[in-house]
């Protein structure tokens, strides 16, 4: 699930040399001239240089043409291939022996290798699925990430876990897991579209309408109010998921609202028992 030590060392030698070049061209962080120095700099500084690289991919061609580090032709070809990077948000759905399964927000499934460490050494399986921001890169006929992951603390319920599992299984059975950028599947084959066999929108709309009458207080148990809020927030999330599945911003806002309602229920429950969170 990770590169060999030799390949991992080569990857970072190439990547850090490229990023040092980008940093020198754009004058972002002072006093970075050697990969060994760059490796020790704070993550914030490395993130700034890394982001600048993908904002100015034309500098990859400049680096290859100038070859300031004196790399061999085959090594320069690896760097040139990084112009095909994929920057986005991914769900890490599971770990397999040969790679980790990344599912993009466009439902494309990738097999991604770790670098020095495999993903199951960095991330506990109990945290899956995990939503991350990452950059995927080709490397020697395989797919790796660029060394920096931005994770989230979002907990996913059974519905999303089930959907992601279904996406993985569909991709696996159809041979659509992208394991290399050298020969990716056709665009019409790479995207897996799940077509529900039933339209749940009317049902969710009706449930949301009925849920409007749910109110706590008036001598009811303290738990009722938070639970009713959770029900309404969950139904709202379901409506957006059905009606606007591509509206990631609205989905995240609704999910955040549902999580706050859930925490209120949890706090009320534990508080009533005298427990501390």
Image (spheres, rainbow, N blue to C red):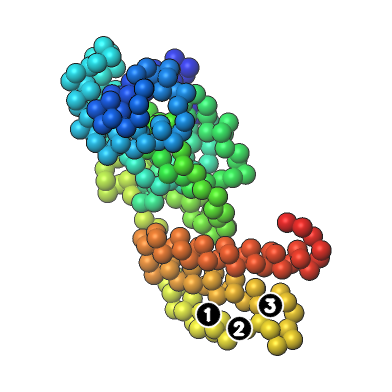
Q: Nearer the viewer, residue 49 or 119?
A: 49
Q: Which mark is residue 207?
A: 1
Answer with mark 3 or mark 1, whichever residue precedes in sequence: 1
Could you classify mark 3 by the number of other residues whose Cα lies within 10 Å: few (under 14), some (14-19), or many (20 or more)?
some
Specify whether residue 228 is in view: yes
Specify whether residue 137 is in view: no
Res 33 → quadrant: top left
Q: Residue at x 68, y 77 (%)?
A: 224
Q: Nearer the viewer, residue 251 or 179?
A: 251
Answer with mark 2 or mark 3, whichever residue precedes in sequence: 2
From the viewer's perspective, is the residue at label 3 or at label 1 nearer?
A: 3
Could you classify mark 1 by the number of other residues whose Cα lies within 10 Å: few (under 14), some (14-19), or many (20 or more)?
some
Q: Which mark is residue 214?
A: 2
Mark 3 sits on what residue?
224
Distance between the alpha carbons at the discs numbered 2 and 3:
9 Å
273 left or right, relative to 33: right
Q: Nearer the viewer, residue 60 or 164?
A: 60
- Element class at badge 1: helix
Which residue lies most toward the front here? Answer: 30
Distance between the alpha carbons at the discs numbered 1 and 2:
11 Å
Could you classify mark 2 by the number of other residues whose Cα lies within 10 Å: few (under 14), some (14-19), or many (20 or more)?
few
């Amino acid at each position: 699930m990770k590169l060999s030590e030799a390949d991992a060392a080569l990857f970072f030698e190439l990547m850090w040399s490229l990023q040092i070049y980008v940093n020198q061209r754009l004058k972002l962080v002072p006093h970075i001239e050697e990969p060994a120095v760059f490796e020790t700099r704070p993550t914030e500084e490395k993130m700034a240089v890394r982001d600048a690289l993908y904002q100015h991919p034309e500098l990859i061609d400049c680096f290859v043409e100038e070859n300031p580090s004196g790399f061999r032709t085959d090594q320069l070809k690896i760097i040139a291939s990084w112009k095909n990077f994929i920057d986005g948000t991914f769900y890490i759905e599971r770990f397999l022996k040969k790679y980790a399964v990344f599912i993009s927000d466009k439902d494309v499934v990738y097999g991604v290798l770790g670098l020095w460490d495999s993903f199951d050494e960095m991330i506990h399986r109990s945290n899956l699925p995990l939503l991350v921001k990452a950059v995927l890169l080709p490397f020697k006929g395989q797919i790796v990430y660029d060394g920096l992951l931005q994770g989230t603390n979002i907990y996913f319920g059974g519905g999303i876990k089930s959907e992601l599992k279904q996406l993985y299984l569909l991709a696996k059975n159809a041979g659509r897991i992208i394991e290399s950028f050298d020969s990716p599947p056709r665009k019409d084959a790479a995207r897996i579209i799940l077509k529900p066999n039933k339209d749940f929108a009317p049902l969710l709309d009706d449930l949301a309408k009925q849920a409007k009458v749910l109110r706590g207080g008036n001598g009811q148990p303290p738990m009722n109010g938070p639970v009713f809020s959770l029900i309404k927030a969950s139904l709202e999330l379901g409506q957006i998921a059905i009606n606007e599945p591509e509206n990631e911003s609205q989905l995240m806002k609704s999910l955040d609202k549902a999580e706050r309602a859930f925490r209120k229920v949890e706090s009320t429950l534990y508080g009533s028992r005298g427990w501390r969170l």
